[in-house]
């Protein structure tokens, strides 16, 4: 379980860093020309995210302090960026210790270090009336996907 938490903690950390860097590059600056929202589209966002991810992927299983990310030979991450109303998803590495690739439908476990991030997004979605906190979690699953866990909400 430790490997899973580490891997998915990295996913969220990288996603947040990528979103911040993309947003900063897209923000107006008095020192340079204005970049319009979604300037360059997915390709521009991917270049920024790739630039963030490459050092992590290049150093294999070690973080910048020399500690191991995982005992697995596979390091993977999914990076999601929401920018100016557009959502982008990028996949890197492998999803499992067995070497299975990430797909568009890969579901990942949220590790302990992401609870604060997840709670913030949950509160924001409630505030925007996008979700009902007392509704069944099944209501928000993709069509055709059935939760197999015990009932999470009344």
Image (spheres, grey):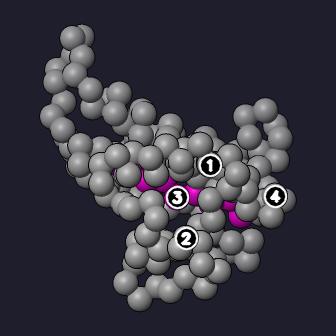
Q: Measure the alpha-carbon separation of dots 1 and 2.
A: 18 Å
* Disc 1: which residue: 115
x, y percent for residue 46: 37, 49
The percent position of residue 117, horizontal first and vertical second, equals 54, 44
Front residue of 48/154: it is 154
Between disc 3 and disc 1, whose residue precedes?
Answer: 3
Regarding residue 104, the answer to whether it shows in the image is no
Local crowd at mark 3 within 10 Å, few (<14), some, or many (≥20)? many
Name the residue at 49% across, 61% down.
Answer: 91
Q: Earlier in the sequence, mark 1 or mark 2?
A: 1
Which residues make up the magenta segment? 74-82
Q: Secondary structure under badge 1?
A: helix
Q: Which residue is mark 4?
A: 2
Q: What predominant SS class does the magenta segment belong to?
A: strand
How far apart are labels 3 and 2 at the CA level?
27 Å
Q: Which mark is residue 78?
A: 3
Which sits earlier in the primary sequence, circle 4 or circle 2? 4
* Dot 3 or dot 2, earlier in sequence: 3
Which residue is at 46% across, 51% downward? 122
Mark 3 secondary-structure assignment:
strand
Q: Nearer the viewer, residue 52 or 14?
A: 14
Quadrant in the picture for the N terminus: bottom right
SS at circle 4: helix
Mark 4, mark 2: which one is toward the viewer? 2
Vertical position of residue 149 compared to residue 132: above or below: below
Give the residue drawn at x 38%, y 62%.
132
Q: Is residue 117 magenta?
A: no
Query: CA–CA distance between discs 4 and 2?
Result: 27 Å
Q: Nearer the viewer, mark 3 or mark 2?
A: 2
């Amino acid at each position: 379980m430790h490997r899973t938490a580490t891997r998915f903690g990295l996913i969220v950390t990288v996603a947040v860093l990528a979103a911040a860097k993309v947003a900063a590059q897209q923000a107006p600056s008095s020192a340079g020309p204005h970049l319009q929202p979604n300037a360059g589209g997915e390709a521009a966002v991917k270049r920024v995210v790739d630039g963030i991810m490459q050092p992590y992927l290049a150093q294999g299983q070690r973080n910048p302090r020399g500690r191991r990310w995982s005992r697995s030979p596979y390091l993977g991450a999914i990076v999601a960026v929401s920018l100016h109303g557009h959502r982008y998803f990028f996949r890197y590495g492998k999803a499992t210790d067995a070497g299975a690739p990430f797909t568009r439908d890969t579901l990942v476990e949220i590790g302990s270090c992401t609870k604060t991030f997840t709670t913030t997004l949950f509160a924001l979605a409630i505030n925007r009336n996008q979700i009902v906190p007392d509704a069944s979690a099944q209501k928000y699953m993709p069509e055709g996907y059935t939760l197999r866990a015990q009932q999470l909400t009344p």
